[in-house]
Amino acid sequence: MVKVSFHTFGCKCNLSDTNDMALSLLEKGPFLILDGELKADIHVINTCAVTASAEAQARNLVRKLDKNNSSSIILVSGCSNRNQQSSYEDLFKTLSMQNKYSAFDNLKQDICKVVSSFIDIGPLDNAKSTASSVFRTRAFVKVQDGCESFCSYCIVPFVRGKEQSRPKDKIIEEINRLYSEGIKEIVLTGINVGSFKGGLEPLLEEILSATKMPRIRLSSLRPSKLSPRLIELMQEKRICPHLHVSLQSGSDKVLKLMNRNDYTVSDFKSSSKAYFEALKGRSPFMAADVIVGFPGEDKEDFEQTYSAIRDSQLNKLHVFIFSPRPGTKAFGMKTEVLPAESKRRSQLLLDLSRKKYLASLNSMVGKSIEVLWEDNSTGHSENYYPVIGQGKKNTLEQKIVLDIDEENEVLIV
Ligand code: SF4
């Protein structure tokens, strides 16, 4: 068996792409697919270009794998490769001569072609089997790709291209196949799932009526897509009461500078309030992405962001320090925020996030939750809290929350 280890950086869209690549390899030959293992015959690094640090991490991993593995094949795919192809070619030139390298796009067909250029995997039309989700109990179903929003800080529209939605019938077909293979939870992924052609709400309605998938989760959503109809649909038990919104700032001035003109802070406040209100019987969860240190973000803007979040019911934050990406509009914007100040703002939000998250965890004690067990001792609740206890892999079970593990930030059942 040829061991292939996938290393995935970035968003759920990338996880979905990794899953697709792994599946197409499994269809072609005797590959053993591994998740992030440092020893393997082939390493596939699916990169992210969203921050300079994500790109640096991927390059460091290439160097580390090169050092630890003699004569393995190291393949680089994904957004960072599409962003700066030559940098990987340059990087490869500096590495040991024992390993073999290639940088490629992450289309399903590509990986088979690239791998077969190094080892013989037989005719490429020789598909043998299908498997559902290679890596996890939950499967990522990509419904959309690409972005045309051109937020001023973001490289994604340049590396992922125009928006494309998958045909609805193909999505339904895939979900039904996953269900028949035993998958109990799907995550609808995309760069902008809310921009699904024809609307996310009609897609959800169709998934609810044409499939029996017990758990349907949404990946990251723009605040403007949190519509009254979506909130109504999320009251349906099979749709997880869990959202991740890309808020980015609590200052309207900064949102404008970011070219995020489709919502205001007040829109976010009212739609998130409506979400928490409508789903209050289901312990709804909402996380948000926030960027600090964006050019033009003065002290007052940051205070607005801080207080908007403090006063909201948000449960958790993902905080990013602004990272200027060459090729984007914000790259040329003058920044007055010193790195130490960006760090301070980031730390303040991280502290706030931890406080909010621990309060959310505590509020769950004594409640009944549905756990999807990922192995016999760990799983996730429908509102996406990590759970530890005793269970049976890939089963859904109703449990009472007994306590929380504050250090590891998990629910104990
Ligand atoms: S919506 Fe904005 S932040 Fe999101 S991928 Fe598109 S350009 Fe980037």
Image (cartoon, rainbow, N blue to C red):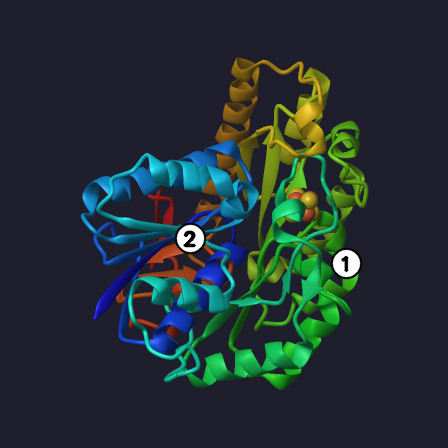
* Residue name at image x 39 percent, y 67 percent: 22
Amino acid marked by disc 2: Val
Q: Secondary structure at mark 1?
A: loop
Residue 398 visible in the snapshot: no
Mark 1, ligand 1, within 8 Å: the answer is: no
* Residue name at image x 53 percent, y 42 percent: 49
Residue 276 x, y percent position in the rendering: 66, 53
Residue 303 x, y percent position in the rendering: 67, 22
Query: Residue 190 appears in which quarter of the rendering?
Result: bottom right
* Residue name at image x 51 percent, y 20 percent: 343
Q: Are marks 2 and 1 in contact (CB under 8 Å)?
A: no
Q: Which residue is mark 2?
A: 365
Give the class, few, some or many, for how many residues have Cα within 10 Å of label 1's Cα (few <14, many ≥20).
Answer: some
119 to 45, vertically: above or below: below
Residue 227, which numbered label?
1
Q: Nearer the viewer, residue 107 or 321?
A: 107
Q: Nearer the viewer, residue 279 or 166?
A: 166
Image quarter where the N terminus lies is bottom left
